[in-house]
Image (spheres, grey):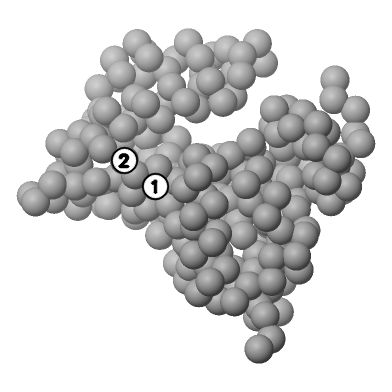
Amino acid sequence: MTKNIAAFFDIDGTIYRDSLLIEHFKMLLQYEYIDMSSWEKKVKEKFSKWENRTGDYDDYLDELVRTYMEALKNFSKNDMDFIAKRVMVLKGDKVYRYTRERLLYHQKENHKVIIISGSPNFLVSKLAKKYGVKDYRASVYKVDEKGNFTGEVKPMWDAESKQKAISYFVKKYNIDLEKSYAYGDTTGDLTMFKNVGHAIAINPAKKLLEKIKEDENLREKVKIIVERKDVIYSLNAKVEIL
């Protein structure tokens, strides 16, 4: 039996030029579902440090995710879905040209295009549908019998969960991982990179670059893509980290 080729995509910072969760959080603030004090007390300081390039993006995002998870507790999933749809309408086209073209390439080649993302499933499902991707795995924000968020999350940002997701799709579609592709931008995507024969780091975070340079196998196979303004740069993992 002929094996299939897959293309595994992260979303935030890889397909999407920001974070779906951040866009949703901002809109929840705008619609006054979340009090500004949640931002002021917990997130603003780390965001400011990141914005001024004196802090780490991952630290800012970790704090935002914690605040977001707590803020959603007891809200109706239907209300959050409404805001998620608004995010897609207003911000859904905010994607990188490189990964948009790669999505189209893999779809035309009849590869199995699969999204694996740590963002909430009710956001990921909508972006996947917008770009014609049938298969995805994302963090599941649990709801109670009334349809309200409980504050519990089944994550899809850790290595173990991502490995299980990859193994599931490999079995489902009889995938040849050595011929397959993975696209990501942070250390959370290393699991995908290690599994496939073709790994592409999109505007990689410094921590991801450091991990790649530490691993001989990754150094050889990872291509680095940097998209800035209207220019796309292709580099190898031997690039100097300043």
Residue at image point 43% right, 52% down: 138
Which is nearer the eye, 66 or 36?
Answer: 66
Could you say which quadrant of the image residue 219 lies in? top right
- Counting from the top left corner in percent of width and height, residue 209 is at 77, 33
Residue 135, position in %: x, y?
48, 68
Disc 2 residue type (three-letter): Val
Q: Which residue is mark 1?
A: 139
Q: Is residue 211 left or right of residue 92?
A: right
For the residue pair 79 and 224, the one nearer the viewer reads as 224
Q: Is residue 25 visible?
A: yes
Q: Which mark is residue 105?
A: none
The quarter holding residue 213 reads: top right
Q: Residue at x 59, y 76 (%)?
A: 174
**Quadrant occupied by the C terminus:** top right
- Would you say 77 lies left or right of 138 here? left
Looking at the image, tell me whether mark 2 or mark 1 is earlier in sequence order. Answer: 1
Residue at (71%, 58%) from the top-left corner?
A: 196
**Depicted 236 relative to depicted 181: above or below:** above
Disc 2 to disc 1: CB gap under 8 Å: yes
Q: Nearer the viewer, residue 84 or 242?
A: 242
Choose between 195 and 140: the one closer to the eye: 195
Instruction: Give the SS element for disc 2.
Output: strand
Query: Does 185 sit left or right of 62 as displayed?
Result: right
**Residue labelled with disc 2:** 153
Q: What x and y, as percent, mark residue 109?
A: 71, 79
Give the CA distance from mark 2 to mark 1. Answer: 7 Å
Mark 1 is on which residue type? Ser
